[in-house]
Amino acid sequence: MTETDDTEAGQTAEHVIDVEPTDTAADTADIETDADSDESSPTRSADDASDDVLAVRKSGLLFSSSIALVVLALDQISKHWALNALSDGRPRHVIWTLQWNLTFNSGMAFSRGQGIGPYIGAIAFIVVIVMLLSLRRSGRGASAVAVGLVVGGALGNLADRVFRGDGWLRGHVIDFIDVRWWPIWNVADMGVTIGGVLLVLTAVFESSSRRS
C-alpha cells in the first residue's frame, strides 16, 4: 500500500470516529427532550382541566343571569300592565277558573303572612345574595336554570317591597293571577316556586348519582 493510501485511510478512520459520538449526543438530546415533554404534559393537562372548569362556570353564570333578568323583566312588565288594566278593581275572566284580579300583598308569596313584609323583604334580600354567590358554581343545566328562576323571582318581589311603599321594605307586592282555588300570585312567585322545586330535584338526582 502506498503512502497516499495510508493517509486517506487514516483520514477516513478519523472521520468515522468523529461522527459516531456526535450522532450519539444528538440521540441523547432527543431522549431528554422527550422526557421533559412527558414530564410537563400532566401540568398542561391540569391547566387545561382548570380552564375547562372556569369556562363552564362562566357559561353557567351568564346563563343563570340571563334567566334571572328575563324573569325580572316579565314580572315587572306584567305588574305594570296589571296596575293599569285592572285599576278599577274588577276581576277579568280569562279561561275556566283563571282570572286577572289585582291585589296588593304585604306578606309572603301567594298572599300569606300579611303584615310581615319588612321581615320577608330582609329574608328575600339574603336569599338573593346567596343565590348570586352560587351562580359562580352553578354550572349548566337544570341547576343553572333553577338558580336563575329563584334569583329573578326574588328580585321581582323585592323590587316591589323597595319601590312600592312609603318605607324601607314596606312596599306591597302586586299579585293578579287568580285561579280562585289558590291564593293570588304573580310571575315572580312562579319563578321562585318552579326554581325551588328544580333545585330540590337536582340535589336529589345528584345525590343518587354519587351513591350509584
Image: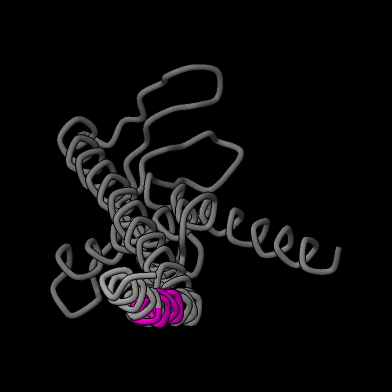
Question: Where's residue 4, x and y in %?
Answer: 26, 71
Question: Where's residue 31, x and y in %?
Answer: 48, 77
Question: Where's residue 198, x and y in %?
Answer: 59, 53
Q: Is residue 74 above or below residue 124?
A: above
Determine the residue located farthest toward the front in the rendered image.
Answer: 2
- Residue 208 painted magenta: no
- Residue 20 painted magenta: yes
- Quarter of the picture containing the N terminus is bottom left
**On the image, which quarter does residue 171 sit in?**
bottom left
Residue 167 makes an appearance in the image: yes
- Quarter of the picture containing the C terminus is bottom right
Residue at left 39%, top 56%?
148
Instruction: Using residue 62 as the reference point, say whether residue 199 is left or right of it.
Output: right
Which segment did they paint magenta? 17-30
Q: Is residue 209 above or below residue 63?
A: below
Question: Where's residue 138, x and y in %?
Answer: 46, 65
Residue at left 64%, top 58%?
202
**On the image, which quarter does residue 126 sit in?**
bottom left
Determine the residue located farthest toward the right in the rendered image.
Answer: 212
Q: Nearer the viewer, residue 100 or 11?
A: 11
Residue 43 makes an appearance in the image: no
Instruction: Using residue 174 as the reference point, say whether residue 94 is left or right of it.
Output: right
Instruction: Using residue 191 as the reference point, say whether residue 209 is left or right of it.
Output: right
Q: How many marks?
A: 0
Q: Nearer the viewer, residue 95 or 48?
A: 48
Instruction: Using residue 37 as the reference point, say whether residue 10 is left or right of it.
Output: left
Residue at left 75%, top 67%?
207
Main SS, magenta region, reads helix
Q: Nearer the viewer, residue 131 or 159?
A: 131
Q: Nearer the viewer, residue 55 or 141?
A: 55
Residue at left 36%, top 72%?
9
